[in-house]
Image: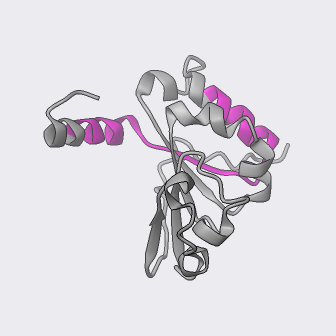
Amino acid sequence: MEEVNFLCYTIKPLQLDCGLCAIVSNSGQMIGQKVGDEIDQYSCIWRMNNAPTKGYTEDVGKRTTVRVVSHTSVPLLLKDPKYFFKEANNTIYVIWGPFRNMRDDGKGIIYNMLKRTAESYRSAKIYITTELRMKHCDHMFKEETGRDR
């Protein structure tokens, strides 16, 4: 059986070799900006959640290197898996969320969704933040906002 390129919970961290990066806001905020060509000139382009590029390339560009996705947005990605995982199969997906949703023991609902997706789209590059990294991020969030996430 062919190995699935499912990179969740590997010890190997994500390694990127980027010169300058563009972090692109949600396309709704970018409509009319006409900076797509400028964005596409960056070596790495980061996008958030399920913000589309199709139909908005003049404003947001067409390339995506990394897509950072909240556990709450995974179901939105999976509404159009061909767009996100087949056509954009060079995109690296970094999924984050609480351990209860990301656990790999069969009880993590988001983890299970992603595993099925990786089995269907074998070229998908899906990374999940570790429980330790999420604890660190939760701590930073509380330090910055004074609130628990």
Q: Main secondary structure of the magenta part?
A: helix
> In the image, is 77 to the left or to the right of 27?
right
121 above or below 21?
Answer: above
Q: Looking at the image, which residue is at 43% across and 79% down? A: 20
> Where is residue 80 drawn, in percent x and y?
76, 41
63, 52: nearer the viewer: 52
Q: For the C terminus, give its image quadrant.
A: top left
| Residue 39 location, quadrant | bottom right
- Whether residue 62 appears in this view of the structure is no
Among all residues in the image, which is located at the extreme front?
A: 32
State the residue at coordinates (52%, 61%). Answer: 30
Is the residue 88 above or below the residue 114 in the image? Answer: below
Say whether residue 117 is magenta.
Answer: yes
Q: Identify which residue is drawn at 44% across, 33% down.
A: 97
Chain part drawn in magenta: 112-139
Relative image position of residue 82 (x, y in whole percent): 80, 47
Q: Residue at x 56, y 56 (%)?
A: 27
Q: Residue furthest top?
A: 107
